[in-house]
Amino acid sequence: MQRRKLGNSNLEVSAIGLGCMGMSFSYGPPKDKQEMTALLGAAVDRGITFFDTAEVYGPYLNEELVGEALAPFRDRVVIATKFGFDISPNSDPRGMKGQR
């Protein structure tokens, strides 16, 4: 697997990363946790070292799935996460209460 360096830190990761957001929410019902854990392990076995998640797809659900699945490989992988915000339609701090 080719590798690349991220930003000025020279953090080295696989040239191909795996976006994990759809594993626990977003693109339909959540996927089976055991299947997703196996998929993440298979990705590491194939040389993937960069995994991307985001809190927006459930309050920490995706980070928990990815973190647990990749724990055995934590010295070999990089996990990135994006922004987070409260996805509850009734708790918008702007007072919009789920309005669009």
Image (cartoon, helix red, strand yellow):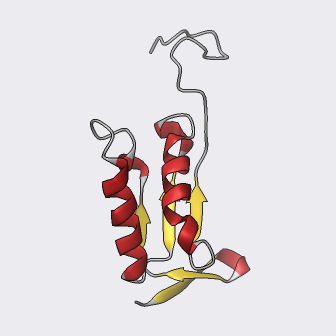
The spot of residue 92 in percent (x, y) is 61, 17
Image quadrant containing the N terminus = bottom left
Nearest the viewer among 100 and 92 is 92
Name the residue rendered at 52%, 38% in the picture.
56
Residue lying farthest to the right in this orientation:
9
Q: Which of these two is toward me, 35 or 78?
A: 35
How many numbered marks does the figure carry? Answer: 0
Which quadrant holds residue 25? top left
Q: Extreme bottom residue here?
A: 2
Q: Quadrant of residue 30?
A: top left
- 74 horizontally vs 100: left or right: right
Q: Residue at x 59, y 70 (%)?
A: 78
Q: Residue at x 67, y 17 (%)?
A: 93
47 w.r.t. 38: above or below: below
Q: Quadrant of residue 71?
A: bottom right
Quarter placement of the C terminus: top left
Residue 40 pos. (x, y %): 40, 65
Instruction: Give me the residue at 42% from left, 49% from top.
Output: 21
82, above or below 91, in the image: below
Residue 80 at x, y percent in the picture: 58, 61
Left or right: where 55 falls relative to 36: right
Is residue 14 placed above or below 25 in the rendered structure?
below
